[in-house]
Image (cartoon, rainbow, N blue to C red):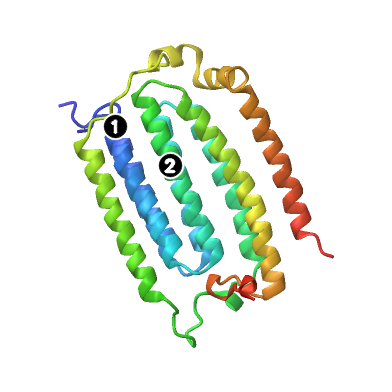
Amino acid sequence: MDMVSFKGIVFIVSALVAVASSLLMVTRKNPIHSALWMIVTFFAMAVIYLLLNAQFIAVAQVMVYAGAIMMLILFVIMMVHMEKGGESDAGKPRRSAKTRIAWALITVVLLGEILLGALFYQMTGQGGEYSVEVVNRVGHVKTVGALLYGQYLFPFEIASILLLVGIVGAVVITKRK
Amino acid sequence: MLQENPSDLCFILSGVLFTIGAVGAILRRNVIVVFMCIELMLNAVNLVFIAAASALSSMDGSIFVFFIMTVAAVEAAVGLAIFVMVFRLQDTVNADEMNLLKG
């Protein structure tokens, strides 16, 4: 009975937590509640990354997404007065509400196609050289680091320039005149 | 169906999360919540990258996810700066009322 292994149980639990918390994130009226549920989603996905043997990505997920980005979003939510521009302006009729709902239904139909594809088609492609045993012998972080500073050195440098441009752009945009 | 390497289940989970994010981005009108929905969609794509790389025993998925995270961080910084600036100018964060470019 190795149908339900320990990893399978952990995967199912964290997948259910991710789906439930992302649904709560979308449906909460208060944006701060949305942001907090989003953090729960990020942690559940970090657990799934750990199950998939991507330890570096799991730690980066917690640090970059759940730490940095969500903290930034929470700060901006607290800076911006939501009651002025919230969604509770009951006076005006909702413009183009029917169009939005139609697009949302089309998106759900596309989800059905994705599910059909994931269920009925086998993934093709050749396996690479980084199997679980090979990666675990030297460690995931060391493997990613060797690739980042070797084969992907130029994209890595471009990413650092992108981060610099983002920092300068954010400061310039928010500067008071 | 529950193997040691649940890549099919990861694809399904990723599709569900992407759809939740897309529907949220379409239906919500608070731009910050729309922004969080976009982050959720990016995360769903990251999950596909990691699951496929794990199933194919490749390392490129992790590298791509690293770069996607970099772009998401930059996007968060610049996008939230734009939201703060729009709120100062227009006193709203409702996407329906942001019609400054309409003329």
Q: Which mark is residue B45?
A: 2
Task: Say few, some or many: other residues with alpha carbon within 10 Å of mark 2 (under 14 / 14 to 19 / 20 or more).
Answer: some
Residue A92 in view, yes or no? yes
Residue B94's x, y, as percent? Answer: 56, 72
Q: Which mark is residue B6?
A: 1
Left or right: residue A84 versus residue A143 is right
The residue sitting at the bottom extreme is: A91
Q: Secondary structure at mark 1?
A: loop
Q: Nearer the viewer, residue B101 or B92?
A: B101
Residue at horizontal 45 percent and vertical 16 percent from the top: A135
Residue A63 in view, yes or no? no
Is residue A80 shown above or below A170?
Answer: below
The residue sitting at the front extreme is: B103
Residue A126's x, y, as percent? Answer: 33, 19
How far is mark 2 from mark 1, CA to CA?
16 Å
Left or right: residue A133 versus residue A110 is right
